[in-house]
Amino acid sequence: MEMTLPSLRPRLTFWQLWNMSFGFFGIQFGFALQNANTSRIFSTLGAQPDDLPLFWLAAPITGLLVQPIVGYMSDNTWHPSWGRRRPFFFIGAVLASIALFLMPNSSALWMAVAVLWMMDAAINISMEPFRAFVGDKLDPSQQTAGFAMQTFFIGCGAVIASLLPTMFSDVFGVSNVPVGGMVPDTVRYSFYIGGLVFFLSVMWTVLTSTESPPENMDKFIAERTASRRPGVALREIVGGFGQMPKTMVQLAFVQFFTWIALFAMWIYTGTAIADNVYGTTDAQSAAYQSAGNWVGIMFGVYNGVSALAAFLLPVVARATSRKAVHTACLIIGGISLASIFMITTREMLIIPMIGVGIAWASILTMPYAILAGALPANRMGYFMGLFNFFVVIPQIVSGLLLGWMTTHVFGGHTVQTLMLGGASMILAGVLTLFVTDKAVAAK
């Protein structure tokens, strides 16, 4: 199929890269609040540790359903004022902001799980087109820099969001103790700010960025009309699996083991630190809630490191290769995550988070930069959405198996589940060596 976007794109200035990526500050603000606090909210509302992975299945399943569909729809969208991707930025921002306001007000476990479904679907509606946005607007020589700028904002947003509950309790004296089994005020206020930041950040990108129309508008309109037939759309969405470039297939294995590790970390760091460092498994206790705040600090550290590393990794990749960088970063991250098992003082937990942050910076940059050079421009959104399958499938596998393994293999000690995650990330680093990177790293 003929490309519908220009094959040669003008180089963008630093501030143009800044504006088109700024929405990710809000997107990750929302994701960070979700990642650091969802297990805490579920536990406060009565969830048991071995049930947490099942409740978390909402996140990957919504991504599995939403991202390819949104990618396909955005590929076949054009509005004279709003462009191709920006309508989806806006719709997702509105829905995600509403969900962020609802989540901490959940009065029952079933409500919190339902809001998680809504929140994750909405965040994915905004996030997926942002990945394709880089492929749309940037020449291959700038794509690594474009994804690195997104990683910078992801890190910045996540640092602030992760620290908010601690800031509310330690600086402003807000109660961090659940009353009547409800979510603490520190978490509630953090989510309110998150909803506002999400919407305003995404709108900044919507209002300050432009998109180029298809080169052949008549051909684009004809293809779009055909794509709106349900049978055609379904056939193209499903048929894309058989058309995946070789590089994408190879990266799928890397992503699978990477995201098993990340899912284990997001689900179980809170309970692991509460048990291994604070000596409690009682979700209603002050010690457990203090552990939750410290996990927010830990997550803030790894996201802060990733924001700084985002600008260093492209430089190292130019001197070596994107594969070498990603391999090294994943191995460092895996060793760091597994080492939490040996740490029993909270201050020392900052050290492994530095290694996790280095890995996170690469996870958000290198696979997408490698992939973008192997994709056809007119199906960039769809294939980026399809690539997300290899992010959410391992999360579904983890959701189904990690709870059983934690209970029956690790005796309920979730810190051992983190060790399993570390081993999985190391394996992902080794598999990166077998990936074909067709595009030459930007010089």
Image (spheres, grey):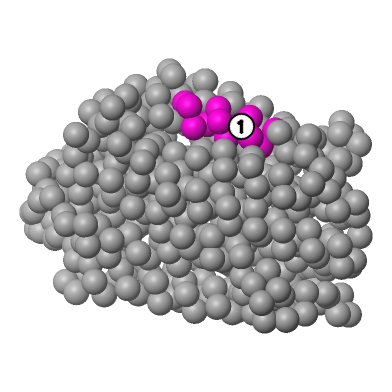
Residue 371, given in percent of the width and then of the height, sits at 34, 35
Q: Main secondary structure of the magenta part?
A: helix
Residue at 43% x, 64% y: name it: 25
Which quarter of the image is occupied by the C terminus? top left
Residue at 73% x, 81% y: name it: 173
Tell me if residue 234 can be seen: no
Residue at 39% x, 71% y: name it: 201
Residue 361, given in percent of the width and then of the height, sits at 46, 44
Residue at 70% x, 45% y: name it: 349
Which quarter of the image is occupied by the N terminus? top left
Give the residue type that dot 1 points to.
Answer: Gly
Q: Which residue is mark 1?
A: 334
Image quarter of residue 112 = bottom right
Residue 422 in the magenta stretch? The answer is no
Horizontally, is 178 left or right of 398 in the view?
Answer: right
Horizontally, is 102 left or right of 222 in the view?
Answer: right
Image quarter of residue 79 = bottom left
Q: Which residues are magenta?
A: 327-338
Tell me if residue 138 can be seen: yes
Residue 356, given in percent of the width and then of the height, sits at 57, 41
Residue 331 in the magenta stretch? The answer is yes
Q: Is residue 15 above or below residue 251?
A: below
Image quarter of residue 314 = top left
**Residue sitting nearer the eye, 116 or 19:** 19
